[in-house]
Structure formats: C-alpha cells, structure tokens
Image (spheres, rainbow, N blue to C red):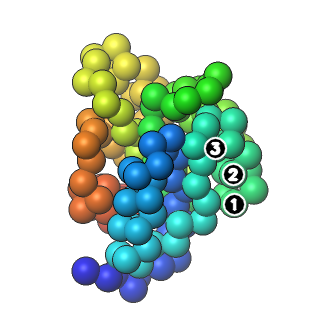
Amino acid sequence: MKNESFKKISVLIVEDEAISLLLLCEGFSIDGFKVCATAATGCEAVIMALEKRPDVVIMDIGLAGEMDGLEAARRIRRDNDAAIVFTTGYNDDELRKRAEEFKPLAFLIKPVEIDELIRVIQAAF
C-alpha cells in the first residue's frame, strides 16, 4: 500500500546479505519511501550517511568487514541525528542492551518483514 506522505522520508539501508538488501529496497520503494543509499559494510554506511543525510537508517548489526552495525551507528550519530532501526539475527540480551545506547526506533530480530519496518517508521514520523 503506497503512502504518498512518506515520499520525503529518506532511508539508508545497511545490509550485507544481497537478497535481503534487494527485498528491503524494493519494499521501501513500493511503499513510497525514498531509499537514498545502501551499504554493505559499516565503513560504507558511515560514508553514505555523511553524504546522503538520511532520515532513517535500517542497520544490520552483524556486518561483514571490520566495523559492525553498532560501531557504524556510533560514528553516524556523531554527525547525523537520523533515526536508527537495528536488525539482527541474534536475540541476545547483551547485544540489545548495547543497542539501546542509541535509543533506536526498534531492535528487530531477523527475519524482519518490510511491513513491520514501515509501521515502526510511520509511528515515529
């Protein structure tokens, strides 16, 4: 269901699994959000956040490369107050506690449905 009022909300999607990234991009685009950038690593996410200044970052915590999603979120938050939604395949209390430091819109366990992500964002905006 396309929602015209959300076209102005820009989303950075940080996900290192290609099929998940493709599905998220498609789902957000269909629902009227602007996917301003994507990233597969934490370093790439920090760069894209600086360049594109998204309103929302969908951040996978377990990323390939040297920087995980929590460290990427920390660096993004230094220069950008974008809302963050964390996604992860691990339902771990310690990980959740570390993520709460960023006051995310949500901490969602994979597999995450696009409808659930959209509801979280719509509730915040």
Report x, y in % for residue 113.
24, 54
Q: Which mark is residue 27?
A: none
Q: Are marks 2 and 3 in contact (CB under 8 Å)?
A: yes
Depicted 91 relative to depicted 106: above or below: above
Nearest to the observer: residue 83 or residue 30: 30
Q: Amino acid at mark 1?
A: Lys
| CB contact under 8 Å: marks 3 and 1 | no
Residue under numbered circle 1: 52
The residue wearing badge 3 is 45
The quadrant of the rendering that contains the C terminus is bottom left
Q: In the displayed orientation, state which residue is furthest to the bottom.
A: 4
Q: Tell me: 57 left or right of 4.
A: right
As drawn, the residue found furthest toward the top would be 94
Q: Quadrant of the N terminus?
A: bottom left
| Residue 99 visible within the image | yes
Give the residue displayed 73% in from the left and 46% down from the top.
47
- Give the structural element (helix, strand or loop) at label 1: helix
Determine the secondary structure under disc 3: helix
Circle 3 or circle 1, nearest the eye: 3
Q: Is residue 86 above or below residue 125?
A: above
Inter-mark Cα distance, 3 to 1 = 10 Å
Classify 10 Å Cα crowding around label 2: few (below 14), some (14-19), many (20 and above): many
Q: Kindly identify the residue that appears in the image at 37 percent across and 19 percent down.
A: 95
Tell me whether the residue at label 2 lies in contact with that at label 1, contact meaning CB atoms closer than 8 angstroms.
yes
The image shows residue 16 at horizontal and vertical percentages of 50, 41
**In the figure, is residue 1 to the left or right of 83?**
left
- Amino acid type at circle 2 is Met
Indicate the quadrant where residue 37 lies.
bottom right
What's under tag 3, amino acid-wise?
Ala
User: In percent of the image, x 51 and y 53: which residue is there?
Assistant: 13
Q: Which residue is mark 2?
A: 48
